Image (tube, rainbow, N blue to C red):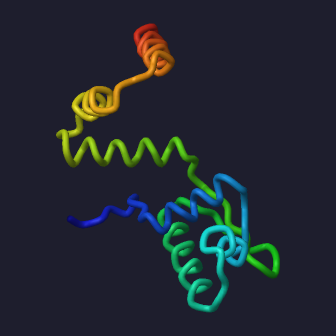
Amino acid sequence: MKRSQADVTEAELSLLHALWDAGPATIRQLVERVYEQDGPSVYATVQKLLDRLEAKGCVRRDRGGAVHVFQAAIDRDELIGRRLRAVADALCGGSLTPLLTHLVEGQGLSAQERKELRALIHRFDRKP
């Protein structure tokens, strides 16, 4: 199956997690945060992953200083939405119902999660 431009690989996702959790960073800082090691091959790998994320619109690069600083251009919730929509499109003909049903029935919900889900549904029911 061909990857769409919006897909984010697991390696790219690890960099996004680092940017979401700790904020903007240089390539070297991301190498240390994510890979906890240094070296030219790791640095080049992170640089290539960031180039791909930038092309996908997931990170922004500040070229203002001597060292480029990267920050997430997409928030976690937006990426979750994109990925869930892609799964629904690929597996469920675009419908979220089978996906949500499987998640709820398969994992079960705590009392708090059921309460939050009811509140969410109630909020959507009240929208015009």
The furthest residue to the bottom: 40
Side (left or right) of 4 relative to 81: left
Please tell me how many numbered marks the rendered image carries.
0
Left or right? Give the position of 120 relative to 86: right
Residue drawn 69% across the image and 74% down it:
32
Quadrant location, the C terminus: top left
Left or right: residue 21 versus residue 116 is: right
Location of residue 45 (image quadrant): bottom right
Residue 121 vertical placement versus 77 (above, below): above
Pinpoint residue 92: horizontal percent, then vertical percent.
19, 39
Q: Nearer the viewer, residue 22 or 125?
A: 22
Which of the pair 105/122 is nearer the observer?
105
- The quadrant of the picture occupied by the N terminus is bottom left
Residue at image location 67% in from the left, 68% down from the top: 33
Residue 47, image x, y percentages: 59, 80
Residue at 24% across, 44% down: 89
* Residue drawn where x is 38% and y is 48% of the image: 83
Measured as percent of width and height from the top left, residue 97 is found at: 25, 28
